[in-house]
Image (tube, rainbow, N blue to C red):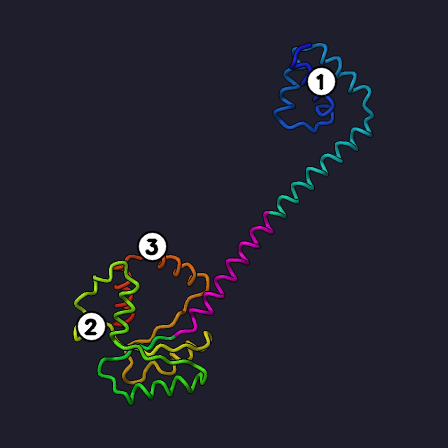
Amino acid sequence: MNRDCDITQDLLFGYNDETLNFGSKEFVENHLKTCENCKKIYEEIKKDKDPEMNNEEIDFLKKIKNKNKKNLILTVIITVLAIFLFITIIAFVNYANKANKIEIFLKDNISSEEIEEIKKMVKEKDKGSEIIHKSKDEALREIKSKLQDPKLLDGYEGEKNIFPSSLVVKTKFYKTKEIKEYIINKEGIKNITIIETNPYMLLIAEIYTKYFNSSNEIIERENINYNQ
């Protein structure tokens, strides 16, 4: 008896029960074609095997396989849902922290009285809002801080500063659109920006801005916001 016979005889019961995988089944079938001894043993196994017991064993093994398959599918579904829930929580927390801001860009010739009137109108919509005035110099420094090479904006100080002053309003994220619509036509306002995208797109945009945006793209985007 050679090694192939030993392996085949160990697999004969599984072969008879139809529980072998494709590779093992093919190995047994090929061996039985050339080995009379193993073929006789297999014939005896088929005779001695109780058909009812055989069916019960096959059904039992099939149930185990089906159960394992279902468990694997359930595990994959739970994992996917957990990942989606985690991303959703991050997206909505980020949205709540970022979408609660309005930036009101002001014209260079705006008067202090007009600025106070804009603040008053904002407070009419949200008494608890926080309003911070950002000067042109502060706007320039902020843009420089976002650039990999701040020297790109050297020479834009003083009268050459192209970035307008603004009022930065921190409010409730569901109030931003209402406030914008209320003050948009007020004299002295150049443009108003708010976040009007969904939480998932905002998260993607933040990731893109952080890891892929170049200095020139940041300057170009800010100029579009200021000049609209």
Q: Residue 9 has which mark?
A: 1
Residue 152 on image: x %, y %: 21, 62
Find numbered disc 3 in the image and state the secondary structure of the residue it sits on.
loop
Say whether residue 194 is left or right of residue 57.
left
Find numbered disc 2 in the image and state the secondary structure of the residue it sits on.
loop
Residue 5 on image: x %, y %: 68, 14
Name the residue rendered at 64%, 24% in the picture: 24
Find numbered disc 1 in the image and state the secondary structure of the residue it sits on.
helix
Please tell me how many numbered marks the rendered image carries: 3
Instruction: Say which label, 3 or 1, has the lower sequence index.
Output: 1
User: Are the residues at dot 3 and dot 1 in contact (C-beta closer than 8 Å)?
Assistant: no
Identify the magenta region: 76-101
Type of amino acid under label 3: Phe
Instruction: Read off the residue under disc 2.
Output: 161
Type of amino acid under label 2: Asn
Say whether residue 199 is left or right of residue 24.
left
User: Label 2 vs label 1: CA separation?
Assistant: 89 Å
Instruction: Say which label, 2 or 1, has the lower sequence index.
Output: 1
User: Is-magenta flag for residue 62?
Assistant: no
Q: Residue 212 has which mark?
A: 3
Instruction: Say which label, 2 or 3, has the lower sequence index.
Output: 2
Pair 3/1: label in front: 3
Q: Residues within 10 Å of mark 2 (few under 14, many from 20)?
A: some
Q: Nearer the viewer, residue 134 or 123?
A: 134
User: Label 2 vs label 3: CA separation?
Assistant: 27 Å
Type of amino acid under label 1: Gln
Say whether residue 209 is left or right of residue 8.
left
Q: Quadrant of residue 136?
A: bottom left
Which SS does the magenta portion mostly show?
Answer: helix
